[in-house]
Amino acid sequence: MSARRATRGPGTANPADDPAFRRALQRRVGALAATVTLKDPTGGLSPTAQRERREQVASAWLYMTCVAAWAEDHHLVEPPLLRTSPPGVVRNAASAPLWLGRAFEALTRHPATQWLLHPEYNPMLWAGAPSATACHELIDWWATQAPSLAWPDQRGYPPSISGWAIGDLLQILSPERRARHALVQTSHFVADFILDLTLHPAAITFRDEPVLRLVDPTAGTGNYLVRTVDYLWQWYTTGRMDPRSVRQTAVTGGQAHRPEEAIRRILAGVDGVDIDPLTAAVARLRITVYLGHLLAEAGVLPRPLRLAAIPA
């Protein structure tokens, strides 16, 4: 298979914002759904309900390839199963479901990320499977046509290692999740605005407390939590917290700590809750990786960052 080639349009950092990529994903859902074999093909479901179930299964499989591609684009897992065959191994249509399974399993190498494949967290992944040929075509699409889910850092925009794309893509590929659980991704600038009006004054009021505490009761895939980590990382490592969206004076006078201690304080004070298990699992993956990324940036963890190497 050839190397991945970028297809997103100019001026767009996150491929999930590209209408062409979103349409391509929807076409992939249809192509996969047409081949899905349900584990319980009847189960009292009407033909319409069975069709909807096949689409849900297809979306679950496609979404997990999005997460796997994001992890591989950031070198979090090894070897890259979606892009090329490992050395000395021939991958064909018959073995494609196995390769997808190995790519999914690679995402669970950390204690905090194993829930991505848990049947009670991600039930549609276990409710059926697309055909081997459809899996092979999906792998080939990622390898030759789909855009990379990594992009260069841009001032003010969330870095791709924070998992912004996989949060957005879950919303795009799960219309039933949007309907049942009101899954709506918060824009980064909205999150910054809210945090400037809440976390920023909290840092002033509780400047002498060892831990600033925040709970997001509707955390979704973790957009607020990721942005909170950025604020607190600066606070705990420099003793300063700069506003991002509201014109106000930076908070100073905090105590600076070593990176490992800063991470411990972030973990002790930042919590999120969500009614949907899969979105919670995605948020947990994103926060785990982003905390590992900060440690790698600080020289505590080696580069390239590997998911399995992030402390439990």
Image: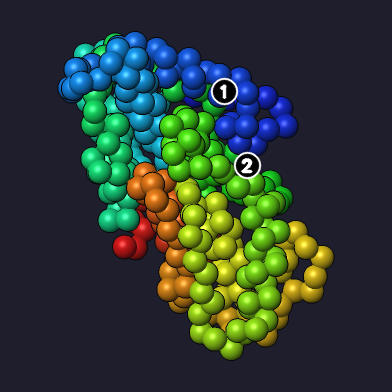
Tell me which residue sits at (67%, 24%) in the image: 9
**Which residue is tagged 2?**
152
Which of labels 2 and 1 is toward the front? 1
Q: Position of residue 95 (x, y in %)?
A: 22, 19
Residue, far bottom: 208
Q: Say which quadrant the C terminus sits in.
A: bottom left
Taking 291 as reference, is 87 left or right? left
Tell me which residue sits at (49%, 19%) in the image: 26
Disc 1 residue type (three-letter): Phe
Instruction: Determine if residue 36 is in view.
Output: no
Q: Say which quadrant the N terminus sits in.
A: top left
In space, the residues marked 2 and 1 are separated at their CA atoms by: 18 Å
| Closer to us: 300 or 201 | 201
**Which residue is tagged 1?**
21
Tell me which residue sits at (61%, 74%) in the image: 235
Q: Position of residue 149 (x, y in %)?
A: 52, 35
| Closer to us: 133 or 189 | 189
Q: Residues within 10 Å of mark 2 (few under 14, many from 20)?
A: few
Q: Secondary structure at mark 1?
A: helix
In the picture, residue 128 is in which quadrant? top left
Q: Position of residue 121 (x, y in %)?
A: 30, 44
Taking 289 as reference, is 9 left or right? right
**N-term mark: 2 or 1:** 1
Q: Secondary structure at mark 2?
A: loop
Tell me which residue sits at (39%, 12%) in the image: 31
